Image (spheres, rainbow, N blue to C red):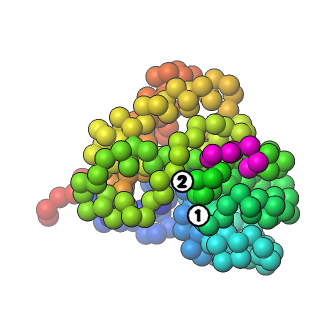
Amino acid sequence: MWTLKSWQGRFLPQPLPPAQERLRYYSGWCDAVEGNTTFYATPTRETVTSWAQQTGPDFRFVLKLPRTITHDHRLTGAEVPVRAFLDAIEPLGPRVHALWVQLPGSFGPSDLPVLAGFLRRLPPTHRYAVEVRDPAFFTDPGPLERVLATVRAEWVPFDTTAFFSSLPVSESEREAWGKKPRMPLRDVALTDQPIVRYLGRDDPARTVEGWQPWLPVVAGWLREGRTPTMFLHTPDNADAPALARRFHDEVRALVPDLDPLPSPEPVEPLTLF
């Protein structure tokens, strides 16, 4: 996501610029984005070309495979939609940091042979990252780790522990309470490009408090020569870009040679007239 109404006048201009320019403003705040929209539909090449034109070659897209592939076909007999998706995202070139296989909660350890076969059939020109939501994978992670290791794929943890640590207090938190998965905490990297999703609270202070355990983990990965990507969310996402930059600054305090994030373009504040 790179456009939110509450970001207007803070992270994006007010009124909003044309759709073909909004990602450019976002890329001044953060250097990576979750491609969540691709889960719902494969974009056109024209749309993807616009994304490439708005971002530099080092910008990272982590794009979800369409749910047609992961949820409807459950990774079986999906050759046609996979080819269509890979063709559509081709204009992004090196900006595709990883393709993200988010699996439904009903996809369990007994389905591992299906995942293994699917990953082996994918072209090696891309990196792949898998997110599972069956808690049984976390009880015995070895089988999934071995499947992922065969194709150098990453396991994407979704850290919701801070979010579920106490009852919701806002409308957006109550809405997310029934939708977000309660996943066990995992902080193990399988490759040189770990990817983490973290869900905080609408209160920025509680979000910052909840991510503290990740600071030494991410700093350690950097010292080991890995290139981690951290995605920070809150239920309303109102402060997400600023929080992402704060997290980066806190990691940078531990790893001073980490490059700074880009400087955002100035945005005029909202006015009454």
Look at the image and say whether residue 221 sits in the magenta stretch: no
Q: Which residue is mark 2?
A: 33
Q: Is residue 151 left or right of residue 169?
A: right
Q: Quadrant of the C terminus?
A: bottom left
x%, y% of residue 92?
Answer: 68, 59
x%, y% of residue 237?
Answer: 37, 55
Say whether disc 2 or disc 1 marks the residue closer to the N-terminus. Answer: 2
Q: Is residue 229 left or right of residue 212?
A: right
For residue 134, say whether it is visible: yes
Q: At x 58% / y 63%, what residue is drawn?
A: 105
**Camera-nearest residue between 16 and 226:** 226
Dot 2 amino acid type:
Val
**Camera-nearest residue between 189 and 233:** 189
The segment highlighted magenta reads: 138-144
Look at the image and say whether residue 141 sits in the magenta stretch: yes
Q: CA distance from mark 2 to mark 1?
A: 24 Å
> Taking 251 as reference, is 87 above or below it?
below
Is most of the magenta stretch helix, strand or loop?
helix
Q: Which residue is mark 1?
A: 105
Q: At x 58% / y 47%, what residue is drawn?
A: 157
Q: Is residue 212 left or right of residue 147?
A: left
x%, y% of residue 189?
Answer: 66, 37
> Taking 255 as reference, is 175 above or below it?
below
Dot 1 amino acid type:
Gly
Q: Secondary structure at mark 1?
A: loop
Q: Secondary structure at mark 2?
A: strand
For residue 13, say whether it is visible: no
Q: Is residue 40 left or right of residue 10?
A: right
